[in-house]
Image (tube, grey):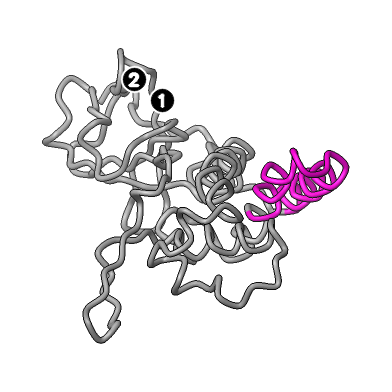
Amino acid sequence: MLLSKLVYLTIKNAIYYDDKSFNFQTFKKGLFDESPDYALNINNAYTPINEAVARLSDLERIPYAMEEIERKDIENGIIDLTKFSKDVKQVISVAQLYDNGTYRALEWSAFGIGKIRIIGAIDKCLPVSIEFKEDIPQFDEDSFEYTYDEDDVETQIKDIDLKEFGITESMCNYIMEYAMGKLTENVSAELANMHITRSEQYFSGIRAVTSAFDQRVVQRFYRIGE
């Protein structure tokens, strides 16, 4: 689901107005940004959406990302996480993969800010795979933008497909539930609590992700006499 669609549906379901003029297209055009009936929720929708995404990440419900580093780019066993294509929130595991589908999990430790250090020997012929939680950015009103020409033809300038972060359509429904609860706190505390409680139940029902590199066995790397 696109972020713009998630924000729109969150606002639409939180307000419950029978207003056909408030649709996805008019929302993207910003026609309701100054509306007294919609502006407050449009401005406030991003904070609970970001909270819900962070909650899913902390509960291990969002799939981990993976980055592969060539052995020649690792000096003294140190890997610079700031050079990854995605922002790293937390390293989950480090391993080297073999052609037969097996792997060897590597021991590692934090090494200052934005770096980790591999402890022990690294196979010089293989790249190193780092499994990590992505630090998903904070979404706001500047995260998507559309323009329209004289014939009202839409052009997408930017938007975010939440699938890129491993956030599924089902997760988007649960995020909406949480955000609706936060947006209705000033209207009805009982209704807000119902939405938030329901969303937490939904979050818990999602199967937790696990590491691709669980250390199942201890593998011998050096032999005496070699």
- Spot occupied by residue 44 in the image (x, y as percentages of width and height): 55, 43
Above or below residue 53? Residue 168 is below
Residue at screen point 80% across, 48% down: 201
Q: Is 88 positioned to the left or the right of 36 in the image?
A: left
Sequence order check: which comes first, mark 2 or mark 1?
Answer: 1
For label 1, the SS is: strand
Q: Which residue is mark 2?
A: 119
Tell me the SS state at disc 2: strand
- In the rendered image, residue 188 lying in the magenta stretch gets the answer yes
> Which residues fall within the magenta stretch?
176-205
Q: Are marks 2 and 1 in contact (CB under 8 Å)?
A: yes
Q: In the depicted view, which residue is nearer to us: 127 or 13?
A: 13
State the image quarter where residue 15 is shown. bottom right
Q: Nearer the viewer, residue 120 or 63?
A: 63
- Residue at (60, 57) in percent of width and height: 11
Q: CA distance from mark 2 to mark 1?
A: 5 Å
Taking 115 as reference, is 90 left or right? right
Quick one: which residue is furthest to the bottom in this view?
151
210 and 181: which is toward the camera: 181
Q: Which mark is residue 196?
A: none
Q: How far across and how far down the image is residue 47, in percent?
A: 54, 39
Q: Please rate how many residues cluster around mark 2, counting C-alpha atoms within 10 Å: few if below 14, some from 14 to 19, many from 20.
A: few
Q: Position of residue 120 (x, y in %)?
A: 32, 21
What's the mark number on residue 107?
Answer: 1
Q: Residues within 10 Å of mark 1 (few under 14, many from 20)?
A: few
- In percent of the image, x 28 and y 25: which residue is there? 121
Three-letter amino acid code of the residue under disc 1: Glu
Query: Is residue 5 rendered magenta in the image?
Result: no
Image vertical order of residue 142 relative to residue 73, above or below: below
Q: Is residue 31 visible?
A: yes
Residue 101 screen position, x and y as percent: 40, 57
